[in-house]
């Protein structure tokens, strides 16, 4: 990008990899020694302060694509009085309990929910209290985690106690109604409070099912489908209530019977394998576009599909990988493997435990959708 100097702050453990892979684009990489958000904030603040002194009079912007650093970036913007989302605005998109409170007040359907109190000593009584409030089974998950870390479906009192025994006291947890339905996501770009691009997508499986060995693959749906129209309108209402003004967003929503039920939303671009899918189908890169908008530029985005696509990931499986299996599809596709035969794995703990990824394309949406449905129960790894 002409006229822009990038100064990149990463964890020290990531610095060499960033310099190796992106050195031509990002020649100035600073490594943070600490691991906590507070350490990242304090060291970044010191580095940025020194940089602004050296380059007095120049414009500065603070941008992150990492969900776990969104609040750090917001605090840094406030510390230096820079443009972009502030802490309060960002918090609405990070804390899953807070976002549901706001949407519930606006009569947008969210799961029945509450904040988990780890200090409760009478586990049986507390379990029955939660069941009376949200039903059984129910979900427990951290309110500020990403990649489905720590998400668990509680189906019994024993499972509830086991979760509490493993819970970390420094993490905030919430419980919510278990929603049985089809999961979709909607990715959008907002400029000056207006949605200038949005796409409704279908998932093969819920993110939580990745830990049970199932694929998580998404496919953009044509806008003229009834479900697309419902989701696009729902997405617009959610972003309006949460006060989104600028940038990329990723919404997840259930279709349960005749209603849509909110799951969560993030003020960031979609996951990594989805970005090249959008670039292939619509001709723009979500991450680059989000960066341009952070710098005050308003892109011209086309919703005209160049080709129909889907992309997604397959989880590692417990045991020793004896065979890496490619699906039999009518559509053209590319498979990328993260593992090799002979490697041994436990079950996937989160969406980061990826065995391989796929991107498929077809000029015919109906044919692509047939292939998409073949992958709902497809296992890409055979283990012994």
Image: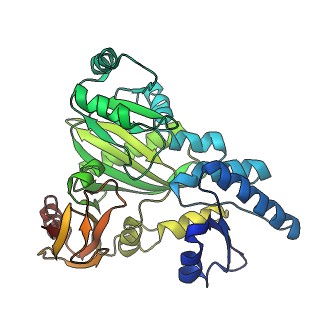
In this view, the residue in front, 247 or 127, is 127
- Tell me the residue at 64%/51% (across/down): 72
Seen at 29% across and 17% down, the residue is 124
For the C terminus, which image quadrant? bottom left
Q: What scheme was used to colour the molecule?
A: rainbow
Q: Position of residue 159 (x, y in %)?
A: 25, 32
Q: Quadrant of residue 334?
A: bottom left
Q: Quadrant of the N terminus?
A: bottom right
Quarter-wise, where is residue 236 in the image?
Answer: top left
**Side (left or right) of 223 relative to 363:** right
Let me know if residue 109 appears in the view: no
Within the image, what quadrant is residue 162 found in?
top left
Residue at 34% from the left image edge and 42% from the top image edge: 151
In the displayed structure image, the side of residue 163 where residue 86 appears, left or right: right
As drawn, the residue found furthest toward the bottom would be: 24
Q: Residue 341, position in %: x, y?
A: 21, 77
Number of marks drawn: 0
Can residue 62 be seen here? The reply is yes
**Viewer-nearest residue: 169 or 26:** 169
The relative height of residue 226 versus residue 313 in the rendered view (above or below) is above
The x and y percentages for residue 31 are: 65, 68
Q: Position of residue 160 (x, y in %)?
A: 29, 29
Judge left or right: residue 293 versus residue 124: right
């Amino acid at each position: 990008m002409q006229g822009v100097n990038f100064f990149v702050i990463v964890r020290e453990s990531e610095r060499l990899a960033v310099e190796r892979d992106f050195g031509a684009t990002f020649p100035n990489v600073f490594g943070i020694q600490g691991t906590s958000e507070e350490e990242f904030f304090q060291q970044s603040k010191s580095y940025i302060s020194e940089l602004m002194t050296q380059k007095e009079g120049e414009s500065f912007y603070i941008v992150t694509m990492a969900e776990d650093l969104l609040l750090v970036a917001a605090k840094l913007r406030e510390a230096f009085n820079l443009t972009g989302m502030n802490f309060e605005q960002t918090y609405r998109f990070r804390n899953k309990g807070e976002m549901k409170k706001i949407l519930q007040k606006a009569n947008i359907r969210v799961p029945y929910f509450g904040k988990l109190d780890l200090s409760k000593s009478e586990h049986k009584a507390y379990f029955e209290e939660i069941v009376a409030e949200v039903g059984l089974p129910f979900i427990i998950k951290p309110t500020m985690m990403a990649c489905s870390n720590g998400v668990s479906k509680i189906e019994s009192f024993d499972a509830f106690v086991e979760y509490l025994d493993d819970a970390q006291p420094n993490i905030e947890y919430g419980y919510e109604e278990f929603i049985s339905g089809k999961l979709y996501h909607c990715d959008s770009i907002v400029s000056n409070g207006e949605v200038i691009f949005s796409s409704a997508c279908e998932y093969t499986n819920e993110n939580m099912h990745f830990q049970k060995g199932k694929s998580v693959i998404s496919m953009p749906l044509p806008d003229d489908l009834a479900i697309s129209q419902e989701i696009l309108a729902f997405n617009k209402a959610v972003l309006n209530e949460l006060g989104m003004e600028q940038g990329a967003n990723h919404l997840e929503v259930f279709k349960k019977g005749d209603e849509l039920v909110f799951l969560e939303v993030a003020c960031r671009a979609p996951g990594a394998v989805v970005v090249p899918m959008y670039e292939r189908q619509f001709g723009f890169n979500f991450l680059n576009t989000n960066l341009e908008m952070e710098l005050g530029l308003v892109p011209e985005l086309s919703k005209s599909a160049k080709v129909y696509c889907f992309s997604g990931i397959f989880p590692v499986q417990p045991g020793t990988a004896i065979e890496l299996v490619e699906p039999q599809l009518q559509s053209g596709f590319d498979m990328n493997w993260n593992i090799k035969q002979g490697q041994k794995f436990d079950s996937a703990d989160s969406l980061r435990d990826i065995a391989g990824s796929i991107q498929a394309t077809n000029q015919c949406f109906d044919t692509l959708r047939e292939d998409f449905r073949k992958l709902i129960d497809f296992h890409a790894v055979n283990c012994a």
